[in-house]
């Protein structure tokens, strides 16, 4: 009779509903949560770096257009220059350089403007090069002097 009683107790225990979670289930769920959180944080970090890179690249394009426009309109001299800075640069990380060379045709100059963002004097993390052709302003000056004589 004893044997029947033990089997009845085992059957009663098996029929009972389990309430709550085991420690193993909690550890597994926490590990899954932490892994997904790490993946989300990595995605956010990549997005932030991409946004910064795009913003710096856009600013480099705008700054190179500004320098090129100043050279083409005559506000800056059409000659090669290194290490120029911008008046509106509060951080002092933006630098520009210009190279003016003969374009192979008489009276035509090739103007190359390079703008770089150098935080702390390091390697540039954003740069843009703009190349344009312009007429040599010296030819106009020489022609005006010949007409006046």
Image: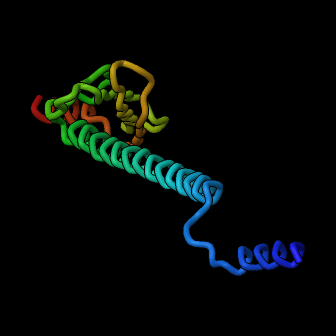
Q: Nearer the viewer, residue 44 or 79?
A: 44
**Which quadrant would residue 71 be assigned to in this image?**
top left
From where the camera sits, is residue 136 visible? Answer: yes
Residue at 38 percent of width and 33 percent of height: 114
The count of marks equals 0
Instruction: Residue 29: give x, y in percent of width and height.
Output: 58, 59
Instruction: Residue 66: give x, y in percent of width and height.
Output: 24, 42
Q: Nearer the viewer, residue 124 or 48?
A: 48
Instruction: Residue 99: give x, y in percent of width and height.
Output: 38, 27
**Which quadrant would residue 49 be assigned to in this image?**
top left
Q: Is residue 49 above or below residue 91?
A: below
Q: Left of 39 or right of it: where is 55?
A: left
Q: Nearer the viewer, residue 112 or 123?
A: 123
Residue at 40 percent of width and 48 percent of height: 48
Residue at 65 percent of width and 55 percent of height: 24
From where the camera sits, is residue 146 visible? Answer: no
The residue furthest front is 1
**Quarter of the image containing the C terminus?**
top left
């Amino acid at each position: 009779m004893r044997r029947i009683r033990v089997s009845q107790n085992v059957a009663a225990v098996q029929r009972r509903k389990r309430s709550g979670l085991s420690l193993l289930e909690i550890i597994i769920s926490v590990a899954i949560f932490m892994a997904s959180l790490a993946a989300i944080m990595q995605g956010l970090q990549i997005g932030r770096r991409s946004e910064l890179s795009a913003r710096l690249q856009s600013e480099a394009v705008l700054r190179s257009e500004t320098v090129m426009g100043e050279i083409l309109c005559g506000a800056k001299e059409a000659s090669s220059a290194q290490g120029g800075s911008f008046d509106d640069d509060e951080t002092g990380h933006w630098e520009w350089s210009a190279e003016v060379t003969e374009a192979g045709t008489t009276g035509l100059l090739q103007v190359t403007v390079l703008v770089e963002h150098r935080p702390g004097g390091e390697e540039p993390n954003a740069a843009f090069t703009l190349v344009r052709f312009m007429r040599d302003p010296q030819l106009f000056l020489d022609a005006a002097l010949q007409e006046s004589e």
